[in-house]
Image (cartoon, grey):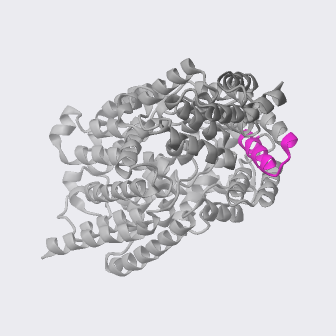
């Protein structure tokens, strides 16, 4: 009866987890999802699987973000194929499935933390065999509560709603599986096969540097202290070798984007305090904090952080309950890599995902057994309600960035992204005001300069727009800066000037879907056959679905060209008329319409040659004659 009841409780916990995230299924993509998923051409075809494991550029359309995470890219490609494109639902379903797997592994892992003694207070530091006790029946319930708490914890919405943060889920699954194999399989332990899941998970993100110290503590506190150093040595060596390999596979252009290592370091203790507070009171969550690094080691916040870390260490050393001590140690050890290695953001709330495994264990172990049913019910329901509410904040870019600027008003990137949501709604004046506020906070932000240029162009100030595009290229001549400037040039009838920028954008980022698509369309319009053929063949190898449309009949293509001219879509007009001419090469009207589209795109010499073809076929073609006269 007890076992059946526990199984039912596990099913109820799974249902609660699904319910907590059910309202996130149609949440949009955010942050790094733009370049890891939306603009990344490589995930659109499973033919690129081999490249995922050999070329880090397949991870992102931005080379500076191209870190080696092939398992993440593979999972995203599978979601893209399963969902038939970029519909977010398929990606979110996988997030929830991975969270359920994580929860199941956590139950088993938490049971193994206490070994045969259960989640009891350790009265001595003797060998486990000398203090072994019968398993406490409450152990399974504490383990289930801790695992469920982790899965529905409101703070973990910051990881679950950011699809590109799937790396946290996959790497945690690998590490937990290795821990469980070590705990439960003497064969895997003896042959080191327990390291295989860890190595696989490292292909999503490398938790290698924390596995060895965590394993050391587990052996020392819950297994055989005499074997701790010897048993920890293999994962330390293998982890170091794998970490070196993974770093060597990052794209040469990859960069962490960090500033001063010293100022970053002295700020991290306060960040730990912030993360610890969020565990017990997950309110005020923000997707993009405006916390800046401290300038002096003696700043008030810095001192508060040092005090917290000191108290945390004292608690780990002095607390009598080893599960609580292990959970607190897990929290600290998990945060060390992102604290010592400077990153672009001093604090980011999806980093606490892995660290909260330890705090969930410590919190569950600290609850008196008699109070567990009531505490678990209240806490899990409260967290589930909070998670669902937070999912609503992540619903759209508009709702997310409105929340961020309210909570992090000193964040220039947040104001820029909020401005983008306004620009998407056609509120260009509001967007410009947001960009100006961002400019005051981050004056040398190249992406902001690009977006200022776009909104200035939309408001009709082409001179200001061009200055902003040039400024973006001066700050950082990366793929986005070249692409958006090229797109603006095409829209302004300056196609020939756009071509070198589009080519450079693709040289910098071969997987940049929008840049590749626009260059294909410009080539198709302008008519350089050799370049178009080479680009089309290369594109087909990466994504067979990305191709230019073909027409079944002359009439269909010609009508499409006329409609495109009527709405001022000159790229479509040029390509449609080239399709018409493929079927009727001597149609003077199709030739004239093609020349007019080329003229509007700024391809003056090409337009002149086509007008001359019209007049060679029909010398009385008055429109072609008049248009040619205007050009000459």
Residue 215 is left or right of residue 439, and the answer is left
Question: Furthest-front residue in view?
Answer: 620
Tell me residue 516's x, y (percent): 56, 32
Q: Identify the residue shown where x is 41% and y is 68%.
A: 22
In the rendered image, residue 228 lying in the magenta stretch gets the answer: no
**Quarter-wise, where is residue 328 in the image?**
bottom left
Q: Looking at the rendering, in which quadrant would you find the C terminus?
A: top right
Q: Magenta region: which residues?
A: 445-464
- Tell which of 487 and 52 is nearer to you: 487
Residue 64 is left or right of residue 126, and the answer is right
Tell me residue 464's x, y (percent): 86, 42
* Secondary structure predominantly adopted by residues drawn in magenta: helix
Q: Identify the residue shown where x is 54% and y is 34%.
A: 580
Residue 417 is left or right of residue 150, and the answer is right
Tell me residue 304's x, y (percent): 67, 57
In the rendered image, residue 448 lying in the magenta stretch gets the answer: yes
Total number of numbered labels? 0
Q: Identify the residue shown where x is 50% and y is 22%.
A: 533
Tell me residue 606's x, y (percent): 70, 23
**Quarter-wise, where is residue 401 in the image?**
bottom right
**Quarter-wise, where is residue 443 in the image?**
top right
- Tell which of 572 and 541 is nearer to you: 572
Q: Is residue 21 visible?
A: yes
Q: Identify the residue shown where x is 41% and y is 56%.
A: 357
Measured along the vertical axis of the image, is residue 341 above or below residue 155? above
Q: Looking at the rendering, in which quadrant would you find the N terminus?
A: bottom left
Q: Is residue 171 visible?
A: no
- Tell which of 446 and 191 is nearer to you: 446
Residue 471 is left or right of residue 53, and the answer is right
Question: Furthest-top residue in view?
Answer: 530
């Amino acid at each position: 009866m007890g076992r059946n009841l526990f199984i039912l409780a596990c099913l109820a916990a799974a249902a609660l987890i699904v319910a907590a995230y059910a309202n996130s299924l149609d949440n949009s993509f955010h942050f790094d999802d733009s370049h890891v998923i939306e603009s990344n051409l490589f995930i659109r075809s499973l033919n690129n699987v081999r490249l995922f494991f050999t070329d880090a550029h397949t991870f992102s359309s931005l080379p500076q973000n191209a870190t080696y995470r092939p398992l993440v890219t593979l999972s995203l490609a599978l979601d893209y194929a399963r969902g038939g494109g970029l519909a977010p639902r398929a990606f979110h379903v996988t997030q929830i499935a991975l969270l359920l797997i994580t929860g199941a592994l956590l139950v088993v892992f938490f049971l193994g933390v206490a070994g045969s003694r259960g989640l009891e207070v350790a009265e001595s530091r003797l060998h486990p065999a000398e203090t072994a006790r019968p398993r406490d029946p409450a152990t399974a319930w504490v383990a289930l509560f801790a695992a469920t708490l982790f899965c529905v914890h409101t703070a973990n919405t910051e990881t679950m709603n950011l699809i590109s943060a799937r790396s946290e889920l996959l790497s945690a699954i690998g590490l937990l599986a290795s821990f469980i194999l070590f705990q439960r399989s003497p064969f895997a332990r003896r042959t080191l096969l327990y390291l295989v899941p860890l190595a696989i998970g490292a292909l999503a993100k490398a938790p290698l540097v924390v596995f060895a110290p965590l394993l050391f503590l587990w052996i020392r506190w819950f297994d055989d202290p005499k074997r701790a150093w010897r048993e920890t040595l293999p994962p330390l060596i293998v982890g170091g070798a794998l970490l070196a390999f993974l770093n060597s596979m990052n794209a040469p252009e990859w960069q962490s984007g960090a500033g001063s290592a010293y100022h970053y370091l002295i700020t991290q203790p306060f960040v730990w305090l912030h993360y610890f507070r969020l565990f017990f009171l997950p309110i005020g969550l923000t997707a993009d904090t405006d916390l800046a690094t401290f300038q002096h080691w003696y700043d008030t916040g810095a001192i508060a952080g040092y005090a917290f870390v000191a108290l945390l260490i004292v608690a780990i050393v002095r607390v009598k309950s080893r599960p609580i001590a292990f959970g607190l140690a897990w929290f600290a050890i998990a945060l060390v890599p992102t604290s010592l290695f400077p990153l672009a953001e001093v604090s980011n709330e999806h980093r606490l995902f892995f660290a909260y495994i330890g705090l969930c264990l410590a919190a569950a172990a600290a609850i008196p057994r008699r109070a567990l049913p009531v505490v678990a019910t209240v806490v899990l329901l409260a967290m589930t309600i909070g998670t669902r509410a937070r999912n609503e904040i992540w619903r759209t870019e508009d709702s997310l960035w409105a929340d961020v600027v309210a909570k992090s008003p000193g964040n220039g990137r947040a104001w820029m992204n909020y401005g983008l949501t306004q620009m998407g709604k056609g509120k260009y004046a509001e967007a410009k005001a947001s960009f100006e506020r961002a400019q005051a906070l981050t004056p040398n932000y190249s992406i902001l300069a690009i977006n200022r240029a776009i909104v200035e162009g939309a408001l009709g100030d082409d001179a200001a727009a061009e200055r902003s595009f040039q400024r973006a290229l001066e700050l950082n001549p990366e793929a986005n800066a070249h692409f958006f400037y090229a797109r603006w040039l095409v829209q302004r009838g300056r196609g020939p000037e756009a071509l070198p920028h589009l080519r450079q954008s693709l040289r910098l980022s071969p997987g940049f879907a929008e840049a590749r698509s626009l260059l294909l369309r410009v080539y198709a319009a302008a008519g350089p056959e050799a370049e178009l053929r080479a680009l089309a063949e290369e594109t087909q190898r990466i994504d067979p679905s990305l191709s230019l449309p073909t027409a079944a009949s002359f009439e269909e293509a010609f009508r499409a060209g006329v409609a495109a001219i009527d709405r001022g879509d000159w790229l479509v007009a040029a390509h449609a008329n080239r399709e018409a001419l493929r079927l009727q090469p001597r149609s003077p009207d199709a030739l004239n319409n093609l020349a007019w589209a080329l003229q509007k795109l700024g391809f003056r010499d090409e337009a002149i040659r086509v007008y001359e073809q019209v007049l060679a076929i029909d010398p009385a073609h008055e429109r072609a004659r008049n248009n040619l006269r205007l050009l000459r």
